[in-house]
Amino acid sequence: MRDIQYIEVPGHTVRVRVDSGPEREGRPALWPSVGEYPIYDPFLYTTMTTDDERNHRFRAALAHLAPDRRILDIGTGQDLLWAREGVQAGARHAVAIEVIEDAFHKAAANLPALEPSDRITLLLGESTRLRFAPRADVCVAEIIGSLAGAEGAAAVLADARTRLLEPGGLVIPHRAVTLAAAVRLSDLLPEQPLAFAEAALPYLRSIFGWHGSPFDVRLRVENPPADALLTEGSPVEVLDFNGDLQTQQRTTTHLAITRPGLVDGVLTWLNLWCLPDEEPLDALRMKTNWATIYLPLFDSPVPVEPGDVLELTFAATLSDDRVHPDYQLQAALRTASGQQHRGSLISPHHGGAFRSHAIYRDLFPAG
């Protein structure tokens, strides 16, 4: 069942379709993507600090790389998690940086209780604007988005490698990849309405309030059924943090349809390596705080059969803040019978269009 609720943003009243169905463990749900915005609250921090799939990989990398080295933790959060874990793993010293003032002040209040607190230096601000000496040997940064680069990891860590790390310094995580597959949104939310989870409303309000007006947020799908995918996943965004790290990139891939169905967009998800040779974290198939992101391409679902191919061009360019990427997608769906359907999406980090695609006009009905 869908209800309409209202979000008040200065100068705007936004109507939002909300799923009034009961919440339960494992049920698919639609949310805005939140990680790329400074709206973290205790709930979001808890989902990260209790993420076993994430945490054991970061801890293993710190156990391997931190002993007797100086480490830098970018985006340390209120719990100074990786600065604290790095020191416990044997780091000589940790510099912990936090840009969100509320989280910084909570971290400062927590710092004296840590042992040994004198081996952690806490700084407030953007890492791209701060300097300290001596430089670090290892940078640990959990600023990876559900779209790998969405939180600005490429620009932030390219800068850290240049200014804040010693020559030859290493970054944790080692690599992050965004994969994409063709889907229909309603197949990701089976037997339930196309609407935001009621618990997502405060985050929509916070994102719109932070920006000052509504815009087409990226759509985060919790617990999607993996059998909804109509193609295999293919890499569309690759971030090699210890290699050739590109702050802007453009990739074209061909997604071959494997079974009959309907397509109106792509589902993207994260693969993450903290060490080069480990099994990657797979956000589609593992329980983790990273979720999948649905990106619409066609206003109406297009029938497909095996043998059809979706040619997808996926580009990331830096937004006007020179940190967070804007994403642009171009799609050409070619059927075995010779038909062709074109779709596109411009998904900026902030601003841009509101109700640009049919799905957004449905989720945010005019009135």
Image (tube, grey):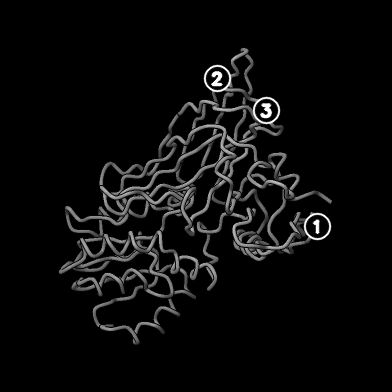
> Could you say which quadrant of the image residue 334 lies in?
top right
Residue tagged by mark 2? Answer: 307
Q: Tell me how far mark 3 sits from mark 2, CA to CA.
A: 14 Å
What's the residue at 31%, 50% (across, down)?
A: 158
Mark 2 burial class by Cα count in 10 Å: few <14, some 14-19, many 20+: some
Left or right, 136 with reference to 26: left
Rendered location of residue 26, percent (x, y): 59, 57
Residue tagged by mark 3? Answer: 302
Q: Looking at the image, is mark 3 or mark 1 earlier in the sequence?
A: 1
Which label sits on residue 49?
A: none
Amino acid tagged 3:
Val
Residue lying farthest to the top in this orientation = 338
Q: State whether residue 54 is above or below residue 228.
A: below
Q: Secondary structure at mark 1?
A: strand
Rendered location of residue 338, percent (x, y): 61, 12
Q: State whether residue 280 is above or below residue 229.
A: below
What's the residue at 25%, 68% (across, down)?
A: 132
Amino acid tagged 1:
Asp
Q: Looking at the image, is mark 3 or mark 2 earlier in the sequence?
A: 3
Q: Secondary structure at mark 3?
A: strand
Mark 3 burial class by Cα count in 10 Å: few <14, some 14-19, many 20+: some
Q: Tell me how far mark 1 sits from mark 2, CA to CA.
A: 40 Å
Compare residues 252 and 198 and report the one nearer the observer.
198
Residue tagged by mark 1? Answer: 3
Q: Tell me how far mark 3 sits from mark 1, CA to CA.
A: 28 Å
Rendered location of residue 339, percent (x, y): 64, 16
Compare residues 95 and 131 and report the one nearer the observer.
95
Q: Nearer the viewer, mark 1 or mark 2?
A: 2
Q: Secondary structure at mark 2?
A: loop
Left or right, 45 with reference to 176: right
